Amino acid sequence: MSRLHKMSVQGIRSFGNRDQDTQVITFFSPLTVIVGPNGSGKTTIIECLKYMATGIMPPGAKTGGAFVHDPKVAHDTEVRGQIRLLFQDVTGHNVQVQRTLVATQKKTSISLRTLEGVIIREGINGEPIQITSKCIELDKEMVTAFGVSTAILENVIFCHQEESNWPLSEGKQLKNKFDDIFAATKYMKALELIRKIRTEKLQTVKISRAEIGHLKTYRDMLNQKRRQHAEIDERRQASKANVDSIKLKLEPIDSRLEFIVKENSKMIDFQRRVDRLTNECEALKKQIRELNAVIDEPFQGSEDELKLLISNFQRDQDKKKRELQDLEAKKLATERQMKKLTDKRTSDTTRLGAYEFEEKQYKSNLIRRLQFLNEYNQQSSQIIDKNDLVNYLDKQIKTEQKQLMEKRLFYQQQETNIQKDLDKFREQRIKTESTIKLKSSQVEKTLKEIQDIKQQQKQIEQYLKQLNDLNKRIERKEDEYQQKLTNGINLEQLKLDISTDEQKRVQLQFELKDLNDEIDNLLVNAKINTEYEMFKKEKSERDEQIRKIKLRHHEILTTIFHGSIPEQDSNIYGQFEIEHRKLQQTRMSLEKQVQDIRQELSGKEEKRRLLSDELKRKDSLRNEYSDRLQEQLNGQVYEEYLEKLSSDVKQKQDEKGNIVGMEKTYQKFVNQVRSTLKNDP
């Protein structure tokens, strides 16, 4: 059986959130009685035990954070509530559980969140084993440790006093409570599952019985197939024995046939070799005849002499080929050098023309720059040095930008002030309009009620007149009655008159009641008239306030509306919106102009910088090319050097013609040697 030992409470309900405010309660066995005056914390202890056992907070504690110590009382934005419970579980081991809550004070409410819970058990050797709520479900572990279901802990043992009247609740709710306490739901589910399984099994039995007949048919068919298979197997064994005997008879025939096939293959190979050698012999004879037909003068020497002559000719031919290759290489090198010099001359000429054009353009730009500086000096009242023009322009641009920024800040501040005043006016206008609408509706209602009252007064006057007439008639009837008493009484006529008068009396009583009601309504209408006068006075006060506000901001409104302030207050807002849009459009156009000027100025600056960099680059390239040209010329004049190159090219072309002639001569010599070899066998 589980037992409670100790519990510490900190930062819960009226318990303080500081360490020195921690309170510890020790539970006695088998009974602990908690007594004390109202507000001493008896219910708080039960709520803490219930929260530790089930994780369920008291009613209303989840949303408002009422379960944790109030941060306002603690003079802090965040209060930590912590509960620790030491108890003995059903197995007799000590268990320590800790749950922590944090309440945070926000602007309008208190937010509550739960931190990580901790459970500490005793191990096999008595060492503590700590597990957090990230690894286990703390609520289920507590239910298992106490050995009691959650429903019993919540509704019986630790039942809150606000929920202790659940035995007096409605039948359905009461049944659900008892089902949870006695765990009847799982037994009902088990019975339902058993019924479902029984139904499924009965259905399976029915299907199995239907399949038995088919299975018997399949069994008979299987037996028949087995008998047929046995007969076929017997015939197969007999056929196999017959085949084995035939194979024994065919073995000598197969060996003889294999020998014949091998001999035939050898004979075919021999015939193929004979045919191949015959064809080679015919080809050699044909080649000898062709060589004899080609050779005009057969060589008279020996075979060694012929081989020596052929090797000498081959060696001379290789030598000539090498010389020819050297000449061709020299020719190609000369052509490449000529092409390189020609390309260089063309590129130098092109660059020289480009440099001359750039020099002319640079000179024209210098002239234009001097003209621009002279014109600017003539137009400007200040004397500016030409070399300091860029610095002066930069200073002027910065000055203009600074003035533009100051004007923008001034107008922005003025616009902000106007916007604030506009917001105030708008708010006052909305309030005034709503008040005017309310007062107008009330005035209309009051006027209507006044008209109704006047109408009712007229009706009352008519009713009073009728009442006077009725009183006169009553007096007249009484006089007549006295006369009749004196002269004699007619009972029937008297009864008839009495009934008639009674009906009139009842009718007059109803009319009198209506008149009293109307008088009460008139009194109420008098109160409404008083309220109407008050509202009218308040409206005049509001109009006076609007007039004072207009006078106080008369200068600003005159500036905004260009001297013509709308007479009607309702038109001020619309006119102000129009003027505000105009100012915004003007500001946007000015900003756009400033932006365009900035872009144009930056473009000019970038163009000036690019032209300056390009000029520097062109000057450096011109100097570099001039140095390279002077280096190539080696102190010579360019025209003389070019003439020398032309003469060298002409000389190389002549050498190329000589080499081509020599090549043709050598080729002719080679052809003669070949023809000599063909004629001399």
Image (cartoon, rainbow, N blue to C red):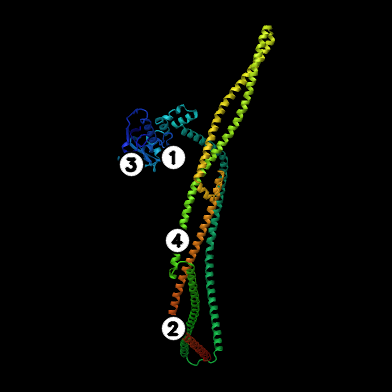
Assess disc 4: are there few (<14), some (14-19) or many (≥20) residues with their C-alpha within 10 Å of its C-alpha.
few
The first of marks 2 and 3 along the sequence is: 3
For marks 4 and 1, give the one nearer the viewer: 4
- Rendered image: mark on residue 129: 3
* Label 4 secondary element: helix
Q: Name the residue under label 1.
A: 108
Residue type, mark 4 in image: Thr
For marks 3 and 4, give the one nearer the viewer: 4
Q: Nearer the viewer, residue 38 or 603?
A: 603
Residue type, mark 2 in image: Leu
Q: Nearer the viewer, residue 592 or 212?
A: 592
Spatial CA distance of label 3 from label 4 is 77 Å
The first of marks 3 and 4 along the sequence is: 3
The first of marks 2 and 1 along the sequence is: 1
Image marks 2 and 3: residues in contact by CB distance under 8 Å = no
- Rendered image: mark on residue 410: none
Q: Mark 2 points at which residue?
A: 633
Q: From the top left corner, tell me how far across and down residue 29 is, in percent.
A: 32, 29
